[in-house]
Image (cartoon, rainbow, N blue to C red):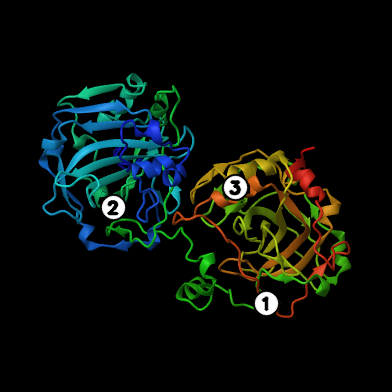
Amino acid sequence: MARMLPMSGVLLAICFSGARGADWTFSDQSAWTNSPAATANGWTCGGNRQSPIDIITSDTVRDPNLDDGFEFSTAMGQNMANASYTNKGYTMQMDNNEYDTSPLTIDGADLPIDPSDYTFLQFHFHWGTATTPGSEHLIDGHRFMAEVHFVFKSIQTALTDDNSLTVLGFFIEIDDTPGFEHGGQWKTLLDAIETLSQEDQTTDYIDAIAISDLIPMYNPSMKKFYHYNGSLTTPPCYEVVNWYVFEDPIYISQDQYDKFFLIRNADNEIPTNTYRFAQPLNGRIVRRTQLATVSNSAPSWTFANQAAWVGTPAAAAGGWTCNGNRQSPIDIDTESTVHDSNLDVGFTFAEALGMPISQMDLANKGYTFQLTDEMMSYFGDSMNLITQRPRSATDSSNKEDYAFWQYHFHWGTEDEPGSEHTVNGKRFAAELHFVFKSKSLALATDNSLTVLGFFIEKYDGTFVPRGPFADIMNELGELIDAGSHVEWDNMFALTDLLPLNDPEVMSKFFHYKGSLTTPPCLEVVNWYVFEDPIYVSEAQFSRFLAGRAHNGELITDTYRAVQPLNDRVVYRTKTADSNTVRMAISALVVALFARIAL
């Protein structure tokens, strides 16, 4: 990874000494809004202007008033008269001990108090684990390894007053160039952690360190930032902060990043994942400078506004075909289905589907959880093939090179079902799509995709999770924020996830020609919807409901409305039920997911 600029990183969160240990933890953030401690202490963590957020750059608005950046007092280039560096048990924090009379001030960047008296108060860090990222803010769903927050407070305001704080946040990333190490005062501060490993240990910096040693004040990167109004990122979560989040990260080495894991709290534990989850934007506008990057990684569509998938500028610009005559999903009216003996031969899969997949990525996409074969995604090649796809008598396609690409989920809410397809008007709790792509056809070409759809239902009994499928389901609860992901390299084969060798399950399906169920809604899909549902426990289903979208809101109702059949024929196999929806617990439950506790 190439270095972009000297290490500089700010993570917003005023951390009040003693409060974290007594009243709140990062591991139970729900208690910040609905606990006795939250009420007793007057926390505002359930407000409408909370931080951090996921900054969707395509939704930001350029503000010329920000373009000139910040003005730093000349004292910022001089050593601080009296500062202390302390292990807080959950972060490392540098405090300006002469804040009340300090000349370390900032101005410009459309700060709300004029004349500005925002004075440097402290800086501190947020991080994840040794291998997973832990920044508080995200950019287009991407979480960085760590974040550092430089906190400036207006001397003329009380902490609880609006605009009392201005925070400059810098991301921290790891530069894996051999031999690289960030030097200067950042190296000094990171090395010092080794001697401050126990909570409340501190060391003084008397006339020994300047803010300009830490912030690249005159670097062009200081004019690439995003700005919004928000809150403290720990209790009491006061909504008093002017946030300025800088685009370019500070780079350190892996060894330097690992210094954070020398820290111990009062319980002799290593603090990890010391960041708050992304919060809803709630209509706030995020402004940016002219030089700040605008990307389009967040989708320009939502399940909540499916009407906008047709006849809007976004639909026209994206070439979406969501108003076509062969759209998905559909309601499968079993009495109207037609048995086609050509389907009874079933699927033939390559032997490679029994081998562990080398590169797999499980991610929160902001609207679903998706497991992707990265080799197929990047290079369009895989040996995990459907070598024979059952085709109806009217299907003239002869492609037999459908390689596993990804699978993803659709769901509703805790109380309302959310499958995409319905059967005889019944909507199931959720739906799982295994997507196979032709290696020789472009995505926009007819028959380019074959999708195997399985319904998911909740089972009232007691389950003991078993196998890779259950492991993946359990992992979903850890992928809280949009963009968060985990690698599953060489961990499982597709035969661990699909009952490929179970004729009882794999012989009962419905088949029709349809489309993608999200924009661009390309009508290129051979759909195979299996009759027997997968059963999960209430606890396992709840994993879906923990994920958050790009805007920080919980991901729910991730299904498209049923589309008109438009004279299409839905075919079925001989053993597929043509009259009722089968609800018996199938072999899929036992073979893949769980066993009933006796």
Label 3, label 1: how many angstroms apart (C-alpha)? 32 Å
- Residues 515 and 25: in front is 25
The residue where tag 3 is placed is 543
SS for callout 2: loop
Image coordinates of residue 178 in percent, x first then y, are 41, 31
User: Where, by quadrant of the figure, is residue 43 drawn?
Assistant: top left
User: Is the residue under label 1 in contact with that under label 3 (CB below 8 Å)?
Assistant: no
Could you tell me residue 437's position as x and y percent? 67, 59
Mark 2 or 1 closer to N-term? 2
Give the SS element for disc 1.
Answer: loop
Indicate whether 41 appears above or below 534.
above
What's the amino acid at mark 2? Answer: Lys
Seen from this angle, which residue lies furthest bottom?
567
- Mark 2 vs 3, N-terminal side: 2
Asked if residue 502 lies left or right of residue 112, the reply is: right
Residue 89 percent location from the top left of the image: 37, 28
Q: Is residue 255 above or below residue 353?
A: above
Question: On the image, numbered disc 1 is attached to which residue?
Answer: 564
Mark 2 is surrounded, within 10 Å at the Cα level, by few (under 14), some (14 to 19) or many (20 or more) other residues, namely many
Q: Which mark is residue 141?
A: none
Query: Which amino acid is tagged 1?
Result: Pro
In the picture, measured across the screen, residue 551 lies left or right of residue 204, that is right
Could you tell me which quadrant the N terminus lies in? top left
- Specify the label residue 224 is tagged with: 2
Give, as a three-letter code, the residue at label 3.
Arg
Check contact, mark 2 vs mark 3: CB within 8 A: no
- The residue depicted at 77 percent of the width and 66 percent of the height is 511
